[in-house]
Image: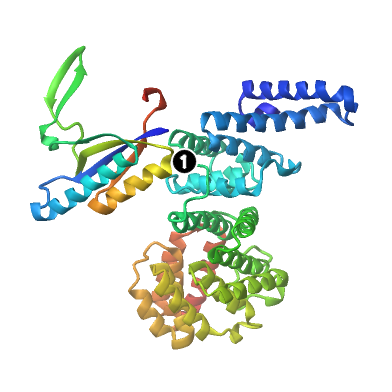
Amino acid sequence: MKQYLLSVYQPDGASPPPEVLGPIMDKVGKWRDAIEAAGAWVFTGGLEAPSTATVLRLSGGEVVITDGPFTEGKEHLGGFTVIRVADLDEALKWGRQFTEITGLPLEVRPVLDAVQT
Amino acid sequence: MLVRVFGDIDFAEDAVQDAFATALERWPAEGLPPSPAGWLITTARRKGIDRARREAARQDKHAQAALLAASVEADQAAEPLGDEVVEDDRLRLIFTCCHPSLGSAAQVALTLRLLGGLTTPEIARAFLVPEPTMAQRIVRAKGKIRAARIPYRVPSEADLPDRLRSALAVVYLIFNEGYTASSGDELIRVDLCTEAIRLGRLLAALMPDEAEVIGLLALMLLTEARRPARTNLDGDLVLLADQDRGRWDLALINEGHSLVRQCLRRNRPGPYQIQAAINAVHTDAPTAAATDWRQILALYDQLVALAPSPVVSLNRAVAVAEVNGPAAALEIVDDLELDGYYVFHSIRADLLARLGRTSEAAAEYMAAIATTGNAAEQRFLRSQRSRVNSAADR
């Protein structure tokens, strides 16, 4: 089995109104449940806004703390899920469902085998 | 030599050891083979593949075994390994090489390397990139297959239409790059066309029930059939209307027509089949004047409905010009956003010239010349432009 990190990228700015977001989040919840039922779910983390991020950098031998996020862009990492499946096609199958539900782009990236337990 | 084949020294040594072990078992009983050294190499190669397969089963690395087996086969094209790589393996390998998670350049390079008969230097030459660049592209793609665990299997039924489209697109891309090289001095790179047709035949043999697979093969055969007439002795481009149809390859045309008829009977039309049918109409006409443009236009209408794209609309406009006149065609062409595509400028120039708008036509030919990197195309476009200019002077 292989672990994959599914990262969600969402546009900066306000989230959609509750009447739009609510039904979508319901479906995302069911999507997560389905992954769990299939025995493929490892971890999910939704993230607070990028403006809440703090960045640490080594500068002149000292760690300097600055206001985040690490990279400014039009889109930011909104959350992630780690799944454990047989191969890329299975990972893409779950990823595709998420993108169909939310309309958001998703990056599917294999986790190094060495860090798997 | 085996190290080259297996790309791994330890691995090759193990394979040789296996071969010697087998020799020790067999030779005393069966006597020496005619060429003991050759026997050892062949056996070591087979053992290596067996070993890779065994390890594959153990470590769940099927793709790697397949890639190895296929590399072996590609390297030893002149010396077939018999049933070592069964048909089923090749089909899976096509879907691995053409996986949509690989970039298009990587898909093409991997497919040519592992399923075609081309070596890395040959592929590099065909795409005019330095050999180390191409080698690195192939290594990276293999690395991604391994790291991301791109599966080595025929996709599930749900995924098959998408994935097959991706595989067919790779084959057609190879063919088109061969047919009109996007850069370089020669108009046509025959080796790429040959490879694409070989791959098309392979796919057709492996998936005979997929109508689009047959359609793509027919399309390539009917295009290839006209190649001998497509350039003159100087290597310059000859337009379809001006080609010596006696130089068309009749055997390829007959085969293509028979495949198109087969597609029509199935009645599951798709973009490749329709394009093949359009080419069948062209190759059916004994002279350019005898071309059934109405039927071609009807086929383009179907293609626009099924797979709309600006390029399809542009090609449809050429048929419209023949059926309804250049003014109607220009109206369609002017609505297309294909600025920078040399065929667009070339067709627009031709339509303007036919409407007597010569100075506009000459300017449009200039735009066409500026947007193609192919020397033969440029020569052709320059000659068209001087024809328009001299017509303007008269």
**Can residue B394 be seen here?**
no
Q: Residue at x 60, y 43 (%)?
A: B114
Where is residue B277, by image quadrant?
A: bottom right
Residue B27 location (% of width, % of height): 86, 24
Kindly identify which residue carries mark 1: B150
- Quarter of the image with the N terminus of chain B is top right
Q: Amino acid at mark 1?
A: Ile
Residue B258 location (% of width, % of height): 66, 73
Q: Residue at x 41, y 74 (%)?
A: B304
Residue B295 horizontal side relative to residue B355, left or right: right
Residue A113 location (% of width, % of height): 41, 27
Residue B241 location (% of width, % of height): 59, 78
Q: Residue at x 44, y 33 (%)?
A: B147
Is B338 in front, or is B43?
B43
Is A39 in front, or is B288?
A39
Is A59 in front, or is B147?
B147
Residue B253 horizontal side relative to residue A51, left or right: right
Q: Chain of mark 1?
A: B
